[in-house]
Image: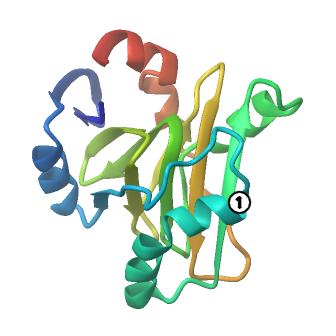
Amino acid sequence: MSILTIFSDTQPTKAETFRDYPVIKEHLAAIDVEFERWNASSVLAADADQASILAAYQKSIDKLNQRYNFQSVDVVSLTTAHPDHQALRQKFLSEHIHEDFEVRFFIDGKGLFFLHVNNKVYAVLCEAGDLISVPNQTPHWFDMGEHPDFKCIRLFTVADGWVAEFTGSGISDNFPNFDQYLAQYA
């Protein structure tokens, strides 16, 4: 189940939590974050390759691409079997921004986005079927947990793909990590 928790950016122990998809979508739309649910056009095998995955979601990708003209689309998968999973996790844990907006669609597993907007922190637990689009220049961070297990479609409007500019803020240290969040809010 997708979950949205809205914190004050100075009081991470006080929060409102929402589990109803239309309510989550409405709160995120108010800060220009797109949140959608996609369905595959066919059943995918657990070991489906990138071409099969993209083909299964091509209709949804094409619809989004008409609005944004993506330059690249790929599939990324990460589990604890990856030898660098801890280093990859650390890469995303600090608050950062992008020139491009960040678009992720979760095929399998889950991940936790934190968006720092208007003196609030929006924690969005995304699971299989969820698409989130974080506007460019929006301070945010992402946590996949100690034991990552997810597969996502990534869509980019710039040829360089994922390029972050770190804010230098330590705000992410004040909020629950992925595993703490699941224990408290899921």
Residue situated in front as seen by the camera: 3 or 51: 51
Residue situated in front as seen by the camera: 115 or 146: 146
Q: Residue furthest front?
A: 42
Decide if residue 157 is on the left or right side of residue 183. right
Q: Amino acid at mark 1?
A: Gln
> Where is residue 153 shown, x and y percent of the image?
57, 58
Q: Is residue 164 visible?
A: no
Judging by the rendered image, the residue that carries numbered circle 1 is: 50
Q: Quadrant of the C terminus?
A: top left
Residue 125 vertical placement versus 167 (above, below) = above
Q: Residue furthest right?
A: 83
Query: What's the residue at 60%, 37% (across, down)?
Result: 150
Decide if residue 122 is on the left or right side of residue 43. left
Query: What's the residue at 23%, 61% (across, down)?
Result: 31
Residue situated in front as seen by the camera: 83 or 43: 43
Say which quarter of the image contains residue 17: top left
How many badges with numbers are in the image? 1
Dot 1 surroundings within 10 Å: few (below 14), some, or many (20 or more)? some
Decide if residue 15 is on the left or right side of residue 48. left
Query: What's the residue at 30%, 42% (across, down)?
Result: 122
Residue 115 vertical placement versus 150 (above, below) = below
Q: Quadrant of the N terminus?
A: top left
> Where is residue 139 shown, x and y percent of the image?
45, 55
> Where is residue 88 shown, x and y percent of the image?
75, 39
Residue 115 vertical placement versus 156 (above, below) = above
Query: What's the residue at 38%, 81% (across, down)?
Result: 63
> Where is residue 54 shown, x and y percent of the image?
60, 66
Q: Say which element carries label 1.
A: helix
